[in-house]
Amino acid sequence: MRRAGVFSMWFDPVKDARLPGDIEPPRSATRSERTENILLTGSTGFLGAFLLDELLDQTDATVHCLVRPSSSQPSAQRVRDNLSAYGRWRPDHDSRIRVVDGDIEKPRLGLAPDVHDELAERVDLVVHSAAAINHVLPYPLLKKTNVTATHEVIRFACQRRAMRIHFMSSTAACVGRARDRVLLYPEERVHASPATLVSAYGLSKWVAERSLQNAARLGVPVTIIRGGDMAGDSRSGIGKTTDLFHLFLRLFVELGERPEPFSGQVNIVPVDFAARMAVFVGGMTDGETFKVVNLVHRQPMPVDGLFEFIRSRGYPSEPVPLGAWVDHCQAFIRKHYSKKQAFVLKYLFREESDGRLFQWYFRPYRFVTDRLSEAIAASGTACPPLDETLWSTYFDRLVDIGYLRPGVEPV
Ligand SMILES: NC(=O)c1ccc[n+]([C@@H]2O[C@H](COP(=O)([O-])OP(=O)(O)OC[C@H]3O[C@@H](n4cnc5c(N)ncnc54)[C@H](OP(=O)(O)O)[C@@H]3O)[C@@H](O)[C@H]2O)c1
């Protein structure tokens, strides 16, 4: 049977991680004690909205949001609408948000020359969150947005005095295949070889991480936040219903069946907690030039626990053999999901030599979280447990917006 790898003879990720020759070490060191101006990419995204909210909350800085112009709406309105959509818009923040048009895939980040030069002079910290999140596209199609653009961010940060870079990466950049073994994922380094990575998206993030490690060697202080799967805001339940987590959740609920045996685990992090920690960790000054933090849930739950919760909400949850469950899922997806969603899920349900691809999503990965634990202790912020209260918040919201039908009260 075919072994699905993310590698190909047509590209060389290790070579792609080398910085272009024209990126030179910054002329002077960073003003690490000051954060007056932050450049944020990806503020029109899901995590981006919460990062912007937290940057405004945890710092006094002006946040310059680099936004890709759209023909339908002015960029400033897009940022504001995105914050509102996730329940994070606050009028008192307005004066500290400055929106600038740009495109991370373009030279000089697509900024107008005068804006570019002004920001190059003023920015202390770049929070790079913009990316193409796609679990199906091959590496060459992700490279421009996730790799070349990261080089452009590094080039920007190396001009004049060094800027700090906080990079939103993903656990996909380190999650490898190891058949039945459970691998341990450290925080302190980027893996030497990406050969076992599960996805091309993860590979593109790995190349970006390695590129940033090279930038740190040039004297640019880098913090990499390796985020796990992010679920909705733990306070309001508002999330991004088009993401993988929601697609699976809907399938689990609407199908009325659960696979047996299926001994995976659910590891999600509420987005509000993730953003708070990402900003907090980045602000912890410990003199390190290169730091990686695994931002996952430290107490994941067994997938059985989720099916039990679904049953307790009044949805049927009949046990069926895994093979039959997969067939039923595929039929359901064809009938009820959009073409784009069906394409993603069909890809994830395909069979490979070491099981179905989607099973990797629920593997019991073990991430080292020492740095995260330190940050949690220092910030005094607890991560919401994956318990009935949190799931109820999510389900109430999903039922309210019509994404899930209400369950039937158990008799
Ligand atoms: N969401 C998660 O579960 C999760 C988990 C782990 C890590 N992460 C990482 O966290 C970061 C943010 O994720 P997210 O959930 O906010 O993603 P998202 O909702 O898909 O948003 C992506 C953002 O990137 C921007 N972008 C893409 N290409 C761009 C370009 N060429 N120029 C300028 N902006 C561009 C998008 O702008 P437009 O609005 O113009 O498209 C959007 O603001 C990503 O780096 C992702 O890898 C996310």
Image: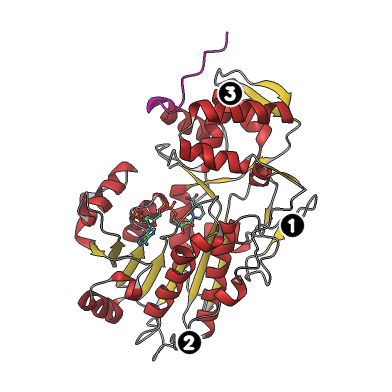
Between disc 1 and disc 3, the foreground one is 3
Give neighbour class at mark 2: few <14, some 14-19, many 20+ (Cα, 10 Å).
few
- Residue 145, given in percent of the width and then of the height, sits at 44, 63
Amino acid on which disc 1 is placed: Leu
Query: In the displayed structure, would residue 187 be above or below residue 222?
Result: above
Q: Please tell me which residue is depicted at 66% across the width and 69% down the height of the picture.
A: 191
- Residue 203, given in percent of the width and then of the height, sits at 59, 62
As for residue 384 lying within the magenta part, the answer is no
Closer to us: 135 or 11? 11
Find the distance from the CA under tag 1 to the CA under tag 3: 32 Å
Query: In the displayed structure, would residue 303 be above or below residue 216?
Result: above
Q: Which mark is residue 21?
A: 2
Chain part drawn in magenta: 399-411
Q: Which mark is residue 255?
A: 3
- Residue 360, given in percent of the width and then of the height, sits at 67, 47
Residue 294 seen anywhere in this rendered image of the structure: yes
Amino acid on which disc 2 is placed: Gly
Say which element carries label 3. Answer: loop
Q: Main secondary structure of the magenta part?
A: loop
Q: Are marks 1 and 3 in contact (CB under 8 Å)?
A: no
Q: Please tell me which residue is depicted at 78% across the width and 51% down the height of the picture.
A: 179
Amino acid on which disc 3 is placed: Leu
> From the viewer's perspective, is 384 left or right of 114?
right
**Residue farthest toward the top in the current orientation of the protein:** 411
Say which element carries label 1. Answer: loop
* Residue at the disc numbered 1: 183
Q: Which color scheme did the rendering employ for the protein?
A: secondary structure
Q: Please tell me which residue is depicted at 52% across the width and 67% down the height of the picture.
A: 224
Between disc 3 and disc 2, the foreground one is 2
Give neighbour class at mark 1: few <14, some 14-19, many 20+ (Cα, 10 Å).
some
